[in-house]
Image (tube, grey):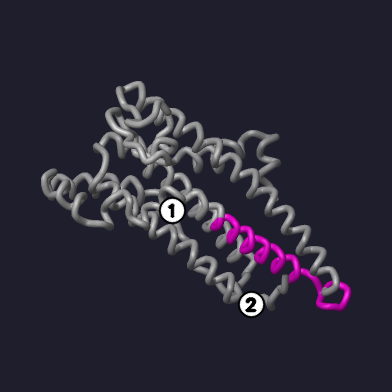
Amino acid sequence: MKVETIVLAKSPVPGDWWLYVYPSLVFFGYILSVLIGEDELERERKEWYWIGGRNVVNHVFAYDGKYLFDGLLGLLIILQVHARLAHEQSLLPTNVRDQENIGQDSKKQFGKVVRVYLVKLVFVYLILWACFLFIDHLFVWTGGRCDISDTKSAETCRSLHGKWAGGFDISGHFCFITNISLILWQELKLLLENANQHSITWNTPCLVYQWIILAVLLTWVNVLTITSIYYHTFLEKVLGCLFGYSCLLIIHYTLPRIKHVNKLLMY
C-alpha cells in the first residue's frame, strides 16, 4: 500500500448528532402518519412502488443490508490501515531502509485492523441474533405466525414468500438498520478523530470510500423514514429503535470495561 505525503489538514468529524436521528424519525413518522390519516396511508402503500415493501431499495438496503454492512466495514478497514500507516511513516526519517519496510508495516497494520474489525463483526451479529430471536418469539407468543409455514423466524417466512402477520411485531427495520448504522457512524467518527489528531490527509480513493459510507447511511435514513410513516404501530417502532442501540452500547460502552474482552478490541 502506497503511503502518501503527510499534509497538515483537518477532516470534518461528525459529532454526536447522529445518535438522535433515529428516535427523531420515529416521532416524525408518527406525527406525519396521524396528519395523513390511515385511509390515505393504505392507499399510498398499495399504489406507490417506492413505499411498498417489495421495492428494490428496500430489498437491497434492508433485507440484504447485512451484505452492505460487511462491505462498508471492509472500506473502514482500508481507511484505518491507511491512517495508521500514514501516521507511523510520518514519525520516521525518510531513507531507503524505511521505504523498504513499508510493505512489512502494511501487512502488520492490516492484520491488527482486520482482527479488531472481525471481533466487532462477530459481536454485532451475535447481538442482532439475540435481538431478533426475542422479537420473532414475542411475535409468535402474541398470536402471530407465518401463513405458509410453522417457522418462528420472520426472515425464513419472508424467504418462503409467506406473510408474517397477526402478532405484536417490533420493527425489524428499525432494530437492524439502527444497529448497523450507529456502529458505522461511531467507527467513522473514531477514524476521523484519529486522523485529525495526527494531521493525516486522505488520498482520492479514501475520500471516495468515506462518501460511499455516508451515502449508504443516508439511504438507510430514507428507508427508515418510509417505515416510520407507513408501517408498524408507534410502540412497535419505539421498541425497534430502542433495540437498535444494542450493538453500540454493548460493543463501544460495555465490552471495553471488561479487561480481557477489551484486549480484543484494541489495535
Q: Give the dominant element type of the magenta stretch: helix, strand or loop.
A: helix
Q: Which residue is mark 1?
A: 16
The extreme right residue here reads 97
Kind of residue at badge 1 = Asp
Residue 86 pos. (x, y %): 70, 69
| Alpha carbon distance from label 1 to label 2 | 27 Å
**N-terminal of the two: label 1 or label 2?**
2
Residue at 60% from the left image edge and 75% from the top image edge: 203
Residue 60 pos. (x, y %): 42, 55
Kind of residue at badge 2 = Val
Q: Which residue is mark 2?
A: 7
Q: Tell me, yes or no, whether the two marked residues, 1 and 2, touch with CB atoms within 8 Å.
A: no
Work out whether residue 157 or residue 60 is closer to the camera in this orientation and state it. 157
Q: Quarter of the image holding residue 135?
A: top left
Horizontal side of 44 relative to 170 (left or right) equals left
Q: Quarter of the image holding residue 192?
A: bottom right
Asked whether 244 falls inside the magenta stretch, the response is no
Horizontal side of 23 relative to 130 (left or right) equals left
In the rendered view, tell whether residue 201 sits above or below residue 46: below
Residue 23 pos. (x, y %): 33, 45
| Range covered by the magenta-colored residues | 71-98
